[in-house]
């Protein structure tokens, strides 16, 4: 007989190692039920943290990010629906002019639209520049606006809309595609499209308005051309690129409130948070995530394109110009209890189970507080190879 003796200290060390290994395993190979329970607890915790911050911001009616301050006003219309309020972020005109002129445009925007239901959120741009609504750090500020409204006014992140007039319309042209995963729909009034990435609008409805006599910066011509491009894309991708384009022949820059029909149009849509077919082109302000796609910010570059689609439990990477591509997954997008296949240019390169991971859950909740964009699995695509987190 062989007798084996362990010292208490050695046994304790062994037990701790075993316990840590089991704990680590339990956090990276979660059942669907365990992942859901972690998500509920983490969302509650993160919302409490956000509420403490936003209570101060909403009392002061301003959000500060680094050296930038976004002042704002809110009006609440109608009764709160069971699934949460809608949020309309309405961007004022002005632009590269005096602070006084932009202040006046802000005041005008506060009175411009009325809602049947929802929070009418009117920010004052933190800058007095021509690109005030789409330059750094508007993405970060918009994110804080949405997270703040989720906890302060019980806004449903699937019912968030962006709209804007003149320079605010310029902002909508840029922010609607760049932050498409935030919006249920967008409405642009009397703006200029510039270099906006139209393909990113594949999964959000877009309404455009311009006066036929609004010839400054060729707005009338360019908005009409934008509408024709949307018409073509809607034919190429049936069911996508939902849009309307309104050119009022006798109207100048001020459309005499004809554009107010945008409000009920916007309200008729809810966000498709997990579209099965996504096109993502990086803008001049870089992002590390777009819907369920991601990339390291340090390797992101303007103009890089990704096109990925899901069919059943297969992810088809149709085009990928990113050096590293992340695929964030959950059980609403596909079935993580089954093997997930990945094809690149039609060739299957992966066919395995993707483990649910507590860290992925926590990171996605902290980033957005968005109940519809909570992910539990992550795939990493690099050099044609696929790996799990």
Image (cartoon, rainbow, N blue to C red):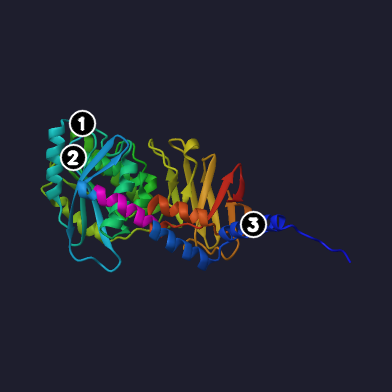
Compare marks 2 and 3 and give the one earlier in the sequence: 3
Q: Is residue 154 left or right of residue 101?
A: right
The residue where tag 1 is placed is 96
Horizontal and vertical percent for residue 215?
Answer: 18, 36
Where residue 93 is drawn, which disc sits there?
A: 2
- Mark-to-mark CA distance, 2 and 1: 10 Å
Examine the image and state in which quarter residue 193 appears: top left
Q: Is residue 353 left or right of residue 177?
A: right
Horizontal and vertical percent for residue 105?
Answer: 14, 40
Q: Residues within 10 Å of mark 1 (few under 14, many from 20)?
A: some
Where residue 276 is drawn, which disc sits there?
A: none
Q: Are marks 2 and 1 in contact (CB under 8 Å)?
A: no
Examine the structure image and report whether residue 73 is included in the region drawn in magenta: no
Compare marks 1 and 3 and give the one earlier in the sequence: 3
User: Which secondary structure class fits the magenta region best?
Assistant: helix
The residue where tag 3 is placed is 16
Residue at the spot x=22%, y=56% of the render? Answer: 119
Callout in the foreground (1, 3)? 3
Q: Residues within 10 Å of mark 2 (few under 14, many from 20)?
A: many
Q: Is residue 135 left or right of residue 77?
A: right
- Give the magenta range: 46-57
- Mark-to-mark CA distance, 1 and 3: 62 Å
Residue at the spot x=23%, y=58% of the render? Answer: 265
Horizontal and vertical percent for residue 60?
Answer: 20, 46
Q: Residues within 10 Å of mark 3 (few under 14, many from 20)?
A: few
């Amino acid at each position: 007989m062989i007798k084996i003796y362990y010292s208490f200290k050695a046994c304790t060390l062994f037990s701790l190692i075993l316990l840590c290994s089991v704990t680590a395993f339990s956090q990276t190979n979660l059942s669907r039920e365990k992942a859901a329970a972690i998500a509920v607890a983490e969302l509650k915790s993160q919302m409490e943290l956000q509420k403490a911050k936003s209570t101060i911001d909403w009392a002061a009616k301003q959000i500060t990010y680094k050296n930038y301050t976004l002042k704002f006003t809110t009006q609440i219309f109608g009764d709160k629906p069971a699934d949460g309020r809608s949020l309309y972020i309405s961007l004022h005109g002005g632009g590269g002019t005096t602070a006084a002129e932009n202040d006046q445009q802000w005041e005008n925007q506060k009175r411009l639209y009325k809602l049947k239901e929802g929070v009418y959120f009117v920010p004052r741009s933190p800058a007095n520049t021509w690109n005030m609504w789409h330059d750094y750090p508007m993405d970060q500020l918009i994110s804080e606006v949405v997270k703040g409204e989720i906890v302060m006014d019980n806004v449903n992140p699937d019912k968030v809309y962006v709209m804007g007039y003149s320079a605010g319309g310029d902002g909508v042209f840029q922010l609607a595609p760049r932050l498409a995963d935030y919006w249920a729909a967008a409405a642009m009034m009397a703006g200029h499209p510039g270099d906006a990435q139209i393909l990113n609008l594949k999964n959000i409805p877009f309404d455009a308005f311009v006066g036929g006599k609004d010839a400054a910066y060729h707005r009338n011509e360019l908005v009409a051309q934008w509408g024709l491009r949307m018409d073509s894309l809607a034919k190429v991708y049936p069911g996508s690129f939902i849009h309307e384009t309104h050119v009022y022949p006798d109207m100048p820059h001020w459309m005499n409130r004809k554009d107010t029909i945008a409000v009920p149009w916007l309200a008729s849509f809810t966000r498709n948070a997990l579209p099965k077919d996504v096109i993502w082109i990086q803008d001049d302000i870089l992002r590390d995530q777009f819907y369920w796609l991601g990339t390291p910010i340090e390797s992101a570059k303007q103009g890089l394109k990704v096109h990925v689609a899901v069919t059943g439990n297969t992810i088809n990477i149709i085009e990928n110009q990113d050096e590293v591509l992340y695929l964030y997954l959950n059980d609403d997008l596909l079935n993580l209890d089954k093997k997930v296949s990945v094809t690149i240019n039609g060739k299957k390169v992966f066919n395995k189970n993707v483990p649910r991971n507590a860290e992925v859950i926590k990171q996605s909740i902290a980033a957005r507080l968005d109940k519809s964009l909570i992910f539990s699995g992550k795939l990493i695509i690099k050099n044609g190879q696929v790996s799990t987190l």
